[in-house]
Amino acid sequence: MLEIILEPLQYSFMQRSLITAVIIGIICAVVGSYLMVQRLALLGDAISHSVLPGLAIAYIVGANIFVGAFIAGLISTAFINLIRTKSNIKEDTAMGIVFSAFFALGITLITIIQKDNKIDLNHFLFGNILGVTANEVRDTIIIAVIVITVVICLYKELLFYSFDKLGAQAVGLPVNLLDLGLMMLIGLTIVASLKAVGVVLVLSLLITPAATAYLLVTRLHKVMFLGVFFGILSSIVGMYLSYYFNLPSGPAIVLVTSTIFVFAFLFSPSQGIFTHPGNFQKEFALLKEIKTLFK
C-alpha cells in the first residue's frame, strides 16, 4: 500500500501536478460555495468559457496567457451585467449569449493560431495538469493566497451579501463592489484551474465539491471546509487513478468528485434518496400521474 502511494511521488512532474491539484481543489471548493448558495452555477460556466479569447489574444501579442484569460473573464462579466441592466433580458439568458459568443470567438482564434504555429492550445479546453511547470505551480499558489486572503477578510460581508443582497444594501454594504469582488475571485479561480481540468470541466470542480458538502451540512463555513476536503480528496484520488490506469487527469478528477456527490445524494443523513424516505413521495406521485395517462 505504501509503495502504491510513494511510487508516483518519485517523479517531479507528479509532485508538481499533485501540488497544483490540491491547491485547485481548495480554492474551487471555497469559491464554489458562494456560487452554489447564490445559484450562480451558470455564471461560473459563462466565465470559464469566456476566457478562451483572452488566452488566444495574449498568446498572439506575447503576453502572459493567464493574465489574458483573467481580463477576458472580467470583460465577459461586464457584458453580462450590461445586457442584464440595460434591457429586459434575464440574467441567465445574458450569460448564455455572452459565454457562447466568447467561446466561439476563442475557438476561432485558437484554430487560426494553430494553422501557423505548431502549438497545442487545446489542453486549455480539456486540461493538462501533468504538464504544469514550476512557474505555473508558483502562479497557482499566488492566486490561491489571494483568493483565500480575500475570502477570510470579507467572509462576513460576502456571507450577508450571498443570502440577502437587498438587506446588505440596506445596511450600507458596498454591494456593487462585493459583486465585482466575487466575479474577480471566480475569474482567478478559473484561471488557476485551466491547466488542471480545462475550460470544459472547470465548472464541475467549482460546483460539485460544494454541492456534495451542502447535502451533508448547512452552514456556509461548514460547507466550505467539507467542500475543501472533498476537493482535495478528489484531486489526489483522480491523480493516482490517472497515473495507474493511464487516464486523462482532468476528467479523472472530475469523475471522482462526481462519484462522491452521487454517494452523498443517495446516502445523505438528511437529504439522501435511500436514507430519507420522504424523498420518494414526489417520485411516487409522478408514477401515479404517468399511470393515469395510460388508463
Image (cartoon, rainbow, N blue to C red):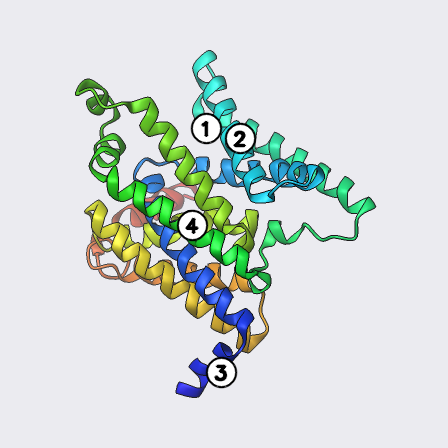
Residue type indicated by callout 4: Ile
Q: Earlier in the sequence, mark 3 or mark 2?
A: 3
Q: Is residue 100 visible?
A: yes
Task: Please give the name of the residue rendered at 77% of the width and 46% of the height, measured from the top-left corner.
Answer: 114
Q: Earlier in the sequence, mark 4 or mark 1?
A: 1
In the drawing, what numbered circle is on residue 148?
Answer: none
The quadrant where residue 156 appears: top left
Residue to which mark 3 is pinned: 7
Camera-side residue of 89 and 253: 253
| CA distance for labels 3 and 2 | 44 Å
Is residue 32 positioned above or below 77 on the image?
Answer: below
Task: Please give the name of the residue rendered at 39% of the width and 50% of the height, measured from the top-left corner.
Answer: 144
Q: Earlier in the sequence, mark 4 or mark 3?
A: 3
Camera-side residue of 277 and 41: 41
Classify mark 4: residues with Cα within 10 Å, few (<14), some (14-19) or many (20+). few
| CA distance for labels 2 and 4 | 31 Å
Classify mark 2: residues with Cα within 10 Å, few (<14), some (14-19) or many (20+). some
Residue to which mark 4 is pinned: 142
Q: Position of residue 18 (x, y in %)?
A: 46, 66
Q: Earlier in the sequence, mark 3 or mark 1?
A: 3
Task: Please give the name of the residue rendered at 37% of the width and 58% of the height, measured from the top-left corner.
Answer: 231
Task: Please give the name of the residue rendered at 50% of the width and 78% of the height, measured from the top-left corner.
Answer: 8
Residue to which mark 2 is pinned: 96
In the visual, does 24 lie left or right of 281? right
- Secondary structure of the residue carrying tag 4 is helix
| CA distance for labels 2 and 1 | 6 Å
